[in-house]
């Protein structure tokens, strides 16, 4: 029979000399793929399942693996894995690996039973998400908004039970309320119990004999609702507000899910925001920059006066403390940073041009710190 067998490493898709972890990983993957419970009535899958387990029973045993690596099939029992012992070998925990892989499919493991209990018991409704856009001022100072959205809500006629008013759900006669059915399947390794959700009740353990005509037995209906949202001061783009119990309706008496409001803020015409700080650019004239002046600075709340000192250079930034945005988490006020840009006139009359020329004659190079310094460097360069 050995000449008809495939190499055990080939069966598991491995190279000769593969380590324990590689062997175990390959076995788990293939055992899951070809297991009889996943391929009912498939003879080819059943044969491959036998082949995979035979290969694993040898390669998972250090002694058998050593003999197989040296002598091939002649070094091991040709019927390895099909005798009266543990067909999965003793190298990696045997049946425990199978139970881990299939989550208690064979009964007794509790995998499906716990999910069945979850289906029968109260379950929280689905969490929902809604994106809204607000103004820059609403983000800075907070606001109360009302939003419309279509969502499922609990049916008012049956109060979420799905049964017609005046009736109740009945215990499923197929599973006696357990929500699961058990079948026994014989395999070369013995009889395995397979537990599946009850097809009659969908795993809930209860059936509706007379569905609610309003919701069709689902216990919920879709409708447009209006929800009030309190937006705290200081939110920003991608801030999320959680509204408990405003999501989808619960199941089997469970609580409703939550609604998450995702904030998008419209940009402002004047201000830019970085965290809690605001940034503003203000144009000033040459005369204001040279002689100094008191300018009007807008903030989000009001207008304030600011004294620009004489000799202010283009691009200079001043800070107005506490004129920014409040922190949504820490309550601290940010600052307002004002950058002054000296604007050069572009439309001049002949008279205005003449005035500037006269001024330029009076304001010589010694009045300009950077210009004089640059001129001196040029002079030194070409000495």
Image (spheres, rainbow, N blue to C red):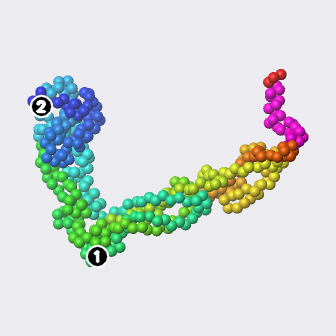
Give the residue displayed 80% in from the left and 32% down from the top.
374
User: Left or right: 53 with respect to 254?
Assistant: left
Left or right for 212, reference 192: right
Give above or below for 36 relative to 1.
below
Q: Which residue lies under the disc numbered 1?
A: 165
- The front one of 372 and 26 is 372
- Could you say which quadrant of the image residue 92 lies in? top left
* Closest to the observer, 108 or 132: 132
Question: In which quadrant of the rendered view does residue 360 lie?
Answer: top right
Q: Which residues are magenta?
A: 356-380
Against 10, residue 120 (above or below) is below
Residue under label 2, please give it: 78
Asked if the magenta segment contains residue 362, the reply would be yes
In the rendered view, would you say 279 is above or below 256? above
The answer for how far apart the CA atoms under marks 2 and 1 are is: 67 Å
Would you say residue 265 is visible in this rendering? Answer: yes
Q: Quadrant of the N terminus?
A: top left
Mark 1 or mark 2, which is nearer the start of the sequence?
2
Farthest residue to the right: give it.
Answer: 362
Q: Position of residue 214 (x, y in %)?
A: 31, 71
**What kind of element bears circle 2?**
loop
């Amino acid at each position: 029979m050995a000449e008809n067998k495939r190499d055990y490493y080939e069966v598991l898709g491995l190279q000769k000399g593969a380590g324990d972890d590689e062997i175990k990983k390959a076995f788990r993957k293939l055992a899951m793929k070809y297991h009889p419970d996943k391929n009912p009535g498939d003879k080819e899958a059943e044969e491959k399942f036998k082949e995979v387990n035979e290969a694993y029973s040898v390669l998972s045993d250090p002694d058998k693996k050593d003999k197989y690596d040296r002598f091939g099939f002649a070094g091991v029992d040709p019927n390895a894995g099909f005798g009266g012992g543990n067909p999965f070998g003793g190298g990696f925990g045997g049946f425990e690996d199978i139970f881990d892989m299939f989550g208690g499919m064979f009964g007794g493991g509790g995998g499906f039973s716990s999910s069945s209990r979850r289906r029968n018991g109260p379950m929280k409704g689905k969490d929902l998400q809604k994106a809204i856009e607000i103004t820059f001022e609403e983000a800075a100072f907070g606001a109360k908004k009302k939003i419309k959205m279509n969502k499922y809500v609990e049916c008012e006629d049956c109060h979420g039970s799905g049964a017609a008013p005046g009736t109740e759900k009945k215990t499923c006669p197929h599973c006696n309320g357990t929500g699961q059915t058990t079948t026994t399947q014989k395999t070369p390794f013995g009889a395995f119990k397979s537990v599946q959700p009850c097809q009659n009740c969908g795993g809930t353990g209860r059936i509706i004999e007379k569905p609610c005509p309003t919701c069709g037995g689902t216990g919920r209906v879709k409708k447009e609702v209006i929800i009030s949202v309190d937006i705290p001061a200081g939110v920003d783009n991608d801030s999320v507000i959680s509204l408990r119990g405003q999501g989808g309706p619960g199941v089997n008496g469970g609580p409703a899910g939550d609604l998450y409001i995702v904030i998008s803020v419209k940009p402002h015409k004047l201000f830019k925001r970085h965290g809690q700080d605001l940034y503003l650019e203000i144009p000033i004239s040459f005369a204001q920059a040279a002689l100094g002046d008191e300018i009007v600075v807008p903030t989000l709340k009001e207008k304030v006066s600011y004294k620009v000192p004489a000799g202010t250079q283009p691009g200079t930034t001043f800070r107005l403390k506490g004129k920014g945005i409040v922190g949504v988490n820490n309550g601290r006020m940010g600052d307002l940073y004002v950058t002054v840009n000296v604007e050069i006139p572009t439309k001049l009359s002949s008279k205005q041009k003449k005035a500037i020329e006269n001024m330029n004659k009076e304001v010589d190079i010694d009045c300009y710190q950077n210009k004089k310094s640059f001129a001196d460097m040029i002079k030194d360069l070409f000495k």
